[in-house]
Amino acid sequence: AQTVTQSQPEMSVQEAETVTLSCTYDTSENNYYLFWYKQPPSRQMILVIRQEAYKQQNATENRFSVNFQKAAKSFSLKISDSQLGDTAMYFCAFSNNNDMRFGAGTRLTVKP
Amino acid sequence: SAVISQKPSRDICQRGTSLTIQCQVDSQVTMMFWYRQQPGQSLTLIATANQGSEATYESGFVIDKFPISRPNLTFSTLTVSNMSPEDSSIYLCSAAGSLGETQYFGPGTRLLVL
């Protein structure tokens, strides 16, 4: 069974600084998808970024980028120029044939 | 991306009663899912709602407790039956266009059972 591990329950960062959230996963599959979702206090889950396992190039979305290390089964999220609106729970997720598994989440606080 | 709405957004119910949560997607989707999330915790998949057939339940969840309907490609309901305080949680609906695609989530239904 696939498992997703987020080892940082809480993190904080100063506004405008950069922060990296860690995620590792365990799978025997070769083709899969990885996601980072953001859940602000309003609780709506929002997709931040997505990575296909067959792509070597790391995905980027504006201030958000990932470091995907397939051999190490690692999928970290880097947030550059952190903004107050980035304060939220961040969930790493693994999907194979739409069987999506979530990590425990990292609560990120951006401080002014 | 898909826009998903859920009704009700929150409810307070008495033990022993049942509540049906509705999930509406603004476009036809292949896959719909129901999750449960305790406040401050991660998501647990309850079941996959299959259009035209019975839902596929995860271990620990049964149809008698969580009956699910999926009458078409844009709508699904989850019923929480014979509720107890342990059912107090946030229930989330999600949808995906096809296998492997991104799941988009509804705003959730916050349920409190007294």
Image (spheres, coloured by chain):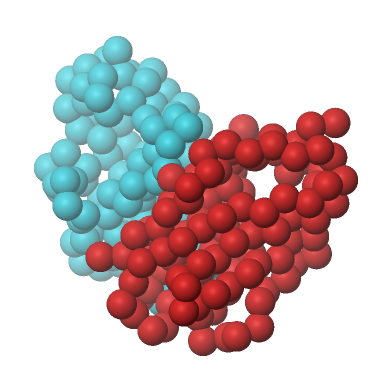
Q: Quadrant of the C terminus of chain A?
A: top right
x 52%, y 50%: residue:
A91
Front in this rendered view, residue B84 or A104: A104
Q: Position of residue A100 (x, y in %)?
A: 39, 62
Q: Is residue B76 above or below residue B79?
A: below
Q: Position of residue A38 (x, y in %)?
A: 61, 49
Residue furthest front as drawn: A72
Is residue B48 something that shows in the picture?
yes
Q: Which hue is chain B drawn in?
A: cyan
x 84%, y 40%: residue:
A15
Q: Which hue is chain A drawn in?
A: red
Q: Quadrant of the N terminus of chain A?
A: bottom left
Q: Position of residue B38 (x, y in %)?
A: 39, 33
Front in this rendered view, residue A23 or B19: A23
Q: Is residue A26 left or right of residue B109?
A: left
Q: Is residue B63 left or right of residue B72?
A: left
